[in-house]
Image (cartoon, rainbow, N blue to C red):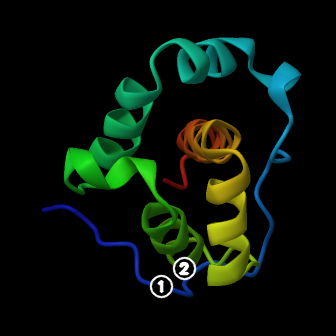
Amino acid sequence: MALTKQPGQCSPSEFQTGLCDFCSDCGTCCMGLCCFPCMGCSIASDMDECCLCGHNMAIRSVYRTRYNINGSLCGDFIAYWCCPICATCQLRRDIDRRKEQGIF
């Protein structure tokens, strides 16, 4: 039986790395640059979503809501519009860190 993470169950927080925090995980940065579609599919798979959903602001918004991360739809849109690779890499880093912490 899988447990479902309910929105707002976590205390309010921020993303664990910055939008342009490339040096905190060079492997994620390289994967984002070299195989952006693969990274999006990996994120979508981790979140039990369709592979096509991993490359847009909607997945970021769902993730923020699920883990009560501060932000807005407008901020998500701007992050993906200005630099989709940066936004996707930030999301991947956050998922990886939450997995390490046992809270994903």
* Along the viewing direction, whichever of 99 and 25 lies nearer the viewer: 25
Instruction: Tell me if label 2 and label 1 are in contact, CB under 8 Å.
Output: yes
Coordinates of residue 5 in the picture (x, y in percent): 39, 73
At label 2, the amino acid type is: Thr
The residue that appears at 53% across and 73% down in the rendered structure is 61
Label 1 CA crowd tier, 10 Å (few <14, some 14–19, many 20+):
few
The residue that appears at 53% across and 41% down in the rendered structure is 99
* Along the viewing direction, whichever of 5 and 17 lies nearer the viewer: 17
Compared with 85, 74 (above or below) is below
Label 2 CA crowd tier, 10 Å (few <14, some 14–19, many 20+):
some
Element under disc 2? helix
At label 1, the amino acid type is: Pro
Sequence-first disc among 2 and 1 = 1
Q: Which residue is mark 1?
A: 7
Q: Which residue is mark 2?
A: 65
Element under disc 1? loop
Coordinates of residue 62 in the picture (x, y in percent): 46, 72
The residue that appears at 24% across and 55% down in the rendered structure is 48
Coordinates of residue 92 in the picture (x, y in percent): 56, 39
Lateral position of residue 78 relative to residue 92, left or right? right
Q: CA distance from mark 2 to mark 1?
A: 6 Å
Compared with 72, 43 (above or below) is above
Lateral position of residue 44 relative to residue 75, left or right? left
The residue that appears at 85% across and 38% down in the rendered structure is 20
**Quadrant housing residue 26:** top right
Compared with 2, 5 (above or below) is below
Coordinates of residue 13 in the picture (x, y in percent): 79, 72
Lateral position of residue 44 relative to residue 78, left or right? left
